[in-house]
Image (spheres, grey):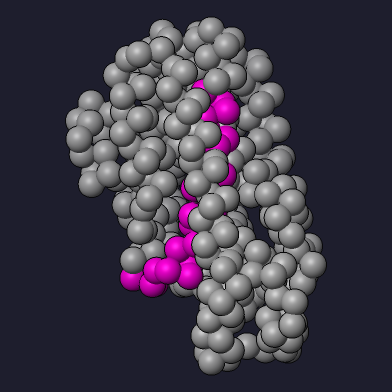
Amino acid sequence: MDRFWGNYPVLLEELRDVKEIIKKNIKSRERYLEDSIYPMIDAGGKMLRPAFLLLASKFGEYDREKMLNIAAVVELLHIATLIHDDIIDDSKLRRGVDTIQAKYGKEYAVYIGDFLFCQCISMLSEYDYDTENLKKMSKVISRICISEISQYHLRYNLNMNLRKYIRVISGKTAALFAISFFAGAKEGKCSEKNQKLLAKIGYNIGMAFQIIDDLLDYKGNTEALGKNALEDIKKGYYTLPLILALNGDKEGRLTKLLSKSSLNSNDIKEIIRQVRIYEGIDKAIKVANRYSKKAMLLIDKLPDCEGKEILSTIVPKLLNREY
């Protein structure tokens, strides 16, 4: 977080305050709760969603205390979904540290995720938040869950295509980015035009972000990403580079490999090679670039202010990242 937002000291200080609000709201007489959750909070995530909410709110009337608390809710919601994701994916690492499910067990991690969801609701009830925001937030939570269910249902599906993939990630990553921008704009009393504009910016950033995240599994390594690379393939979760390569695999080589009952390290290496041969990586980059360019075009339409300057600078940096 400090490295990514270091050029914006005011925003960085606000995000540190958001962290403290999160910690305050998960304090318990049971110390082990804090011991299990704090490492994930402190592990160095970029805190993009709360940052985007704060930036969006500054296009209108900025109420610092209120916005920091809403930003904390958004980040806490994100953390809760990550904890549940790690259970489903059996992930050992998250943000470079042991996942809660790896360290304490799946049952414990389920309860922790549920606890954080409850804390989100509790925090929202403490402020006079806009009713429309509350409705949209609940819809986003529902949409995330439905998209996770859809993704699970589509495991090992050799007929996966771009349309199905887009539907899944738009309900997961893009929805939470969009609501972060929208909630900030709505609570900041921005014009309806700018509320919609900022929500669209969040959606397109979220779509590009997730595609790039999936691409990094084919280009990065476990140390750089802070998680186990390419585990998705073994578990039957086919992301865009592989999907686009499958669509071009007229000879069925990839299909034959993926149809095996289990995959060893040599199989994975061959799958990656075939993805490159069928230009899955290059084609996925083009899709990500389309969303990135649309986000930048929409940012250009925002009113001139510091928030616009920050978005214009950090969004290209974010969407050309290596970690």
In which quadrant will I find the C terminus? bottom left
Q: Which residue shows up at 75% across the image and 63% down it?
A: 160
Q: Magenta stretch containing residue 244, yes or no? A: no
Query: Can residue 266 be seen?
Result: yes
Q: Main secondary structure of the magenta part?
A: helix
Say if 146 sits above or below 32 in the image: above
Say if 309 sits above or below 83 in the image: above
User: How many numbered tags mark residues here?
Assistant: 0
Q: Which residue shows up at 63% across the image and 30% down it?
A: 137
Residue 111, image quadrant: bottom right
State the residue in front, 262 or 308: 308
Give the side of residue 108 with respect to residue 254, left or right.
Answer: left
Say if 33 sits above or below 252 in the image: above
In which quadrant will I find the N terminus? top left
Residue 55 percent coordinates (x, y): 38, 24
Residue 223, image quadrant: bottom left
Q: Which residue shows up at 59% across the image and 19% down it?
A: 196
Residue 36 percent coordinates (x, y): 42, 58
Say if 306 sits above or below 244 in the image: above
Query: Can residue 231 be seen?
Result: no
Residue 299, image quadrant: top left
Residue 112 percent coordinates (x, y): 54, 53
State the residue in front, 200 or 231: 200
Give the side of residue 23 with respect to residue 211, left or right.
Answer: left
Q: Which residues are magenta?
A: 198-223
Q: Magenta stretch containing residue 208, yes or no? A: yes
Q: Which residue shows up at 58% across the image and 80% down it?
A: 274
Residue 192 percent coordinates (x, y): 59, 10
Give the side of residue 130 with respect to residue 254, left or right.
Answer: left
